[in-house]
Amino acid sequence: MHSIDKPSFLRRVFALLFALASFACAACSTLPKETDASTAPKPADTASASETLPRFDLASRTVKLNSGHSMPLIGLGTWTMTDEQAEECVYHALKIGVRLIDTARYYQCEVGVGRGVKRAIAEGFVTREEVFITTKIQPSDMARPSEAIDDSLAALDCDHIDLMLIHEPGSNDEQVYRAMEAAVRAGKLRSIGISNYNTIEALDEVLSYAEIPPAVIQIENHIYNQNRELKQFAEKHGIVINSYYPFGGRGNTQELFNNELILELAEKYGRSSAQIILRWHLQAGYVAVPGSKNPDHISENYSVFDFELTYDEMQRILRLDEQRRFANW
Ligand SMILES: NC(=O)c1ccc[n+]([C@@H]2O[C@H](COP(=O)([O-])OP(=O)(O)OC[C@H]3O[C@@H](n4cnc5c(N)ncnc54)[C@H](OP(=O)(O)O)[C@@H]3O)[C@@H](O)[C@H]2O)c1
């Protein structure tokens, strides 16, 4: 019988262990460096990335922001509305349960938004604390950010704004961001963020100077432009992605609504294409602010909490991503 040579057997065992250890080290070096100082979560340096992930709670229909405040998951966008339309649409939206209203100084309908909110409060079906108002510092106000914040407070006729965003990158973003941070400390703003900062680099630059990290980044986001890498990076910092153009924006909605897969799912669930798309935003972890001047559409867009797309269906929608934007700014 063949006897075992003990020293050579031990040598082979050690060689095997050494090879396994080398392989493990090589594998580790290709993992994302979650503890790297440049990508480490800012809100609490000791927290792991998963602890900072924004948590979508479909039961309460809100997500807890890194500012500590909760943001509703589906809102009403007010781009292209007049003051009169904004007042009516906001009032209707609040009446049927919507709690997030997205506006901007640039849209010139903050006054109407404020009136709609006040009417709803006066009629007693909602309180100011339950309504979440987002507005934005417009490009032409970048040289006077503190005044712009006060202008929005006056136009909306309220004592605080729930979320103020820099509408788009400009030349003195850091000073504008500092003014928003000061307004948070003064109790005028509850959460702050940025919009149209479409790349990881652009967001990372804001993070490099932010003392209060952005809570939200609002970008063009829909089934054809899913911003997955930016979302992953944002989530590491506890930042929520807020989709504008959830239907692709005016002039493009039919392309999304008539997508073959969206139509197939609409048929399966007995829902409209708009509802399938909004349900996808929710389950994929995006806050969405569909714009509509039609009360029936506003109600339809909020009726997306009582059905669920399967994992497989979510994966199929994921594959529609073409990183295609419709906006040209
Ligand atoms: N940060 C930024 O730079 C930025 C840029 C653009 C937009 N936004 C914000 O994002 C919001 C959403 O974007 P958006 O309004 O431009 O585009 P959108 O929400 O993608 O699409 C709006 C279009 O969809 C239609 N629509 C809405 N619900 C529908 C439904 N259930 N069935 C059929 N059609 C429906 C609307 O028509 P009806 O009125 O007839 O319903 C409107 O024509 C804006 O309102 C604004 O608040 C921000």
Image (cartoon, rainbow, N blue to C red):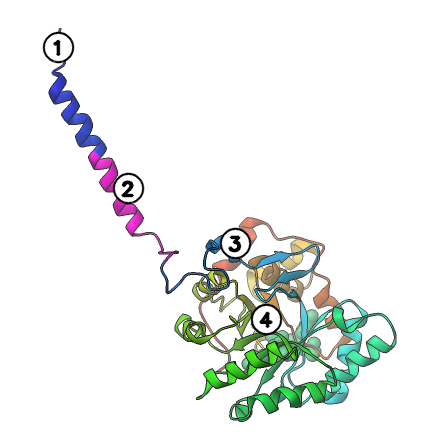
**In what element is the residue under mark 4?**
loop
Magenta stretch: residue 31 in it?
yes
**In what element is the residue under mark 3?**
helix
Instruction: Tell which of 27 and 278 is nearer to you.
Output: 27
On whether ligand 1 comes within 8 Å of the CB at mark 4, the answer is: yes
Residue, far front: 186
Q: Which mark is residue 51?
A: 3
**Mark 2 or mark 4, whichever is nearer to me:** 2
Query: Looking at the picture, how far across and down is residue 138, in whole percent?
Result: 56, 88
Residue located at (74% from left, 77% from top)? 294
C-beta proximity under 8 Å, tags 4 and 3: no
Q: Quadrant of ligand 1?
A: bottom right
Marked residue nearer the N-terminal end (4 or 1):
1
Q: Give the Cα separation between the discs numbered 4 and 3.
A: 28 Å
Q: Amino acid at mark 1?
A: Ser
Confirm whether residue 168 shows in the render: yes
Q: Which mark is residue 24?
A: 2
Residue wearing tag 1: 3
**Looking at the image, how many numbered discs can be counted on the residues?**
4
- Range of the magenta residues? 18-35
Image: 183 above or below 257: below
Q: Quadrant of residue 24?
A: top left
Q: Amino acid at mark 4?
A: Pro
Position of the N terminus, as image quadrant, is top left
Categorize mark 2 by other alpha carbons within 10 Å: few (<14), some (14-19), many (20+). Answer: few
Q: Amino acid at mark 2?
A: Ala
Residue, far right: 123
Q: Give the Cα separation between the discs numbered 4 and 1.
A: 73 Å
Q: Which mark is residue 246?
A: 4
Marked residue nearer the N-terminal end (4 or 3):
3
